Amino acid sequence: MRSALHAEWTKVRTVAGPLWLLLGAIAATVALSAGATSVVTCTSAGCGGDPTRLSLIGVILGQAPVAVLAVLIISGEFGSGMIRTTLTAAPRRITVLAAKAVTLTGLVSAAGTVAVLGSLLTGWLILPGHGVTAARGHSALSLADGPTLRAAVGSVLYLILIALLSLGVATAVRDSAAGIGIVLGLLYLFPILSQTIGGPHWQRLLQQIGPMNAGLTVQATTDLHDLPIGPWAGLGVTAGWAAAALLAGGLLLRTGDA
Amino acid sequence: MTAAVTRSRSGRNGLAQVVRAEWTKFRTVRGWVIGTVAAALMLVLFAALTGAGSVQHGAPRVPVGPGGEPVTDSFYFVHRPLAGDGSITVSVSALRSSIPRGLADLRPGVVPWSKAGLIIKQSTRQGSPYAAIMVTGGHGVRMQDDYVGDTAGLPGPVSAASPRWLRLDRSGDAITGRASADGTHWTTVGTVHVSGLGPTAQGGLFVASPPSVHGMGTSGSVSTAVFDDLRVQGSWAGGDWAGDQVGPESPSFSGYPPNTSGSVTGSAGRFTVTGAGDIAPAVRVTLPTGGTLGEILTGTFAALIAVIVVGALFITTEYRKKLIHVTLAASPKRIRVLVAKATVLGAVTFVAGLAGAAVAVRLGERLARANGVYIFPVTSSTELRVELGVAALLATASIIALSVGAVLRHSAGAVTTVIVAIVLPYILVAIPFMPASVANWLTRVTPAAAFAVQQTLVRYHQVSGVYTPYEGYYPLGPWAGLAVLAGYAVVSLAVAAVLLRRRDA
């Protein structure tokens, strides 16, 4: 396992792609968060809901480069035939997948932490200028605040789970375009479907089982009783998706020809 | 090199041949064909899910106006039969509205399209033809007829210090509305021809108070008007004025605020009337249970992802398999190869998208109607526009994916870039607290503008509503929205063409 980890780390370290994707994820997250917090307006009805969640909205964009990185880490090897070298050097295929998962977790947790802290910082800087102030019942964003800390930590965990989900899907389908298409479909289609498929029961169900809708409830800090699913339970749903994808990927990696 | 050789070479490598070569490649790669067929199936599958997922059996019927459009026809009506020609005159000295701020907390407020005035209507049946003249909360005197007609009269609000006199004259099917600020000097606001009034119509006073719109939400309102000096001439039936709520149970009427109700008090020409509801075309906020073609075509998003994957792979696979060297050796004019690929991909995607959309719309509508769901009506030309538009949207998106794939030479990057560029703005637009100005901006400049091609709802200036892209009202027209996406396609194709010529393959 140790040598497999070392090998994966060397592979990631020595090409430029992963670094750019991680920097892209950070930039995308912070940029969208900054954009969203600077357009919010306070009306008599309220200040655009949940300031913490609004500050962390960039995660819905930042997860895309993270998913690309996770897909490429495995399907890039299938595409170039490198996978044969990898599996010759480390014949235990599950070990290879595990080493990739661990490497990915490390990379995404580092980049995710920077992205999330950056987003919260932009929210902390921008929101008070748009009337989201204590006078209107919104305290300043602070990590000392329990729900905000949970939202921040949860967002980093969410990004890690999306990376693992993408790794599993890409291992199963072995093609980067199909892999990323499936991952983005899983992430972005559930929120759109839950708006149009009729009946409140169906809408709630779709919000409870979609990997993005459910997982991002971990960012909620207000109106917790109105959520379709609890914050940690929601993240658990995303973890379930990631586990299922990794399991499917692991099984297909073991049984299929490389 | 002789001219003859040059000619024969260009003949062999003419666009038609290159297109044919690309078509052969496309149809022989199983994954691409499966992806394209899957896109069409997604449209149908999601239409079936949307159509079957919502059940509204037993809901009251949606009232439909003389023009076939859904309407709100729920208001408080103080009426008497009018058997033939006649006129009616009244003065309005007050129109006050209240909006609930919470349970049992009714505050005075401004409802711009609250209405109080005179109406002659075929009957109290919802959706029947009518003509009316009225004062409004914020738009002065108006003459309106058959739900969609609206003509402005004297401006300014009404009060005890400046009342408004209103008059309707019926002569056959012609109804003339007049208004006056002093009761002696009258100006004609308009004459309308109302067909189908019948020999005996109902005429009298009415008060309506549509939902108040604040930001993204609405709340019911109720309005009270004071009428004086009510006089009638002509073939009016004798007897008392009868007060009735027209259309008390209707999908396009959300009812009275808690602890309020419609009423009429007074006599001898002076009446105080309280009412809620509206007499106007229905829009999304007043008919929330209505479905649209855009909702039936939710599968467009899933189909988009499939065609984007195929579009990107159509070029990146050539780079990965090094087939691009063979392709460019066989046809050295690189731009021509790109154009041929875009032509084949666009045509195949368009055909698949059109087939999918045509089946999806019919299936979805049929399932929804069978489940008692009302679908906002569209003309057959609008339906065709939506189907062609969805097919064109998918074809354009696949060409963008092809171009971005040619630029990045990398399928995962290309697929992600194009999906995020088209789908993410739409998701942002749907965030509840997104201000309308930002949502409109996003659906004007980003590729998500193209979803305007699915819009079928009509915006009415005389109805306050939440006219945002999320509710199905786009800032750009259908083809203008699609043109924005086409613009992105042209730019990305141009960049791809330049890079394809300049770079080594």
Image (cartoon, coloured by chain):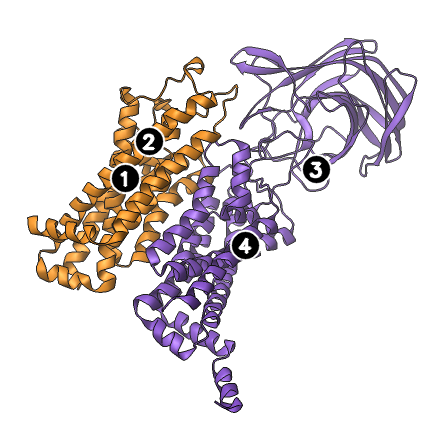
Chain colours: A orange, B purple
Mark 2 / mark 1, whichever is N-terminal: 1
Q: Which residue is mark 1?
A: A159
Mark 3 / mark 4, whichever is N-terminal: 3
Label 1 or label 3, whichever lies nearer to me, is 1
Residue under the image location 64 percent in, 53 percent down: B380
Q: Position of residue A164 (x, y in %)?
A: 23, 45
Please tell me whether residue A1 is drawn above or below residue B29 in the rendered image. Answer: above
Give the structural element (helix, strand or loop) at label 4.
helix
Q: Amino acid at mark 2?
A: Thr
Same chain letter for marks 1 and 3:
no
In the image, B502 versus B68, the foreground residue is B502
Same chain letter for marks 2 and 3:
no
Q: Which residue is mark 2?
A: A217
Q: CA distance from mark 2 to mark 3?
A: 44 Å
Instruction: Answer left or right for B500 relative to A105.
Output: right
In the image, B26 versus B40, the foreground residue is B26
Q: Which residue is mark 3?
A: B65
Q: CA distance from mark 4 to mark 1?
A: 33 Å
Q: Position of residue B185 (x, y in %)?
A: 92, 19
Tags 1 and 3 in contact by the CB under 8 Å rule? no
Q: Amino acid at mark 4?
A: Gly
In the rendered structure, the residue with mark 2 lies on which chain? A
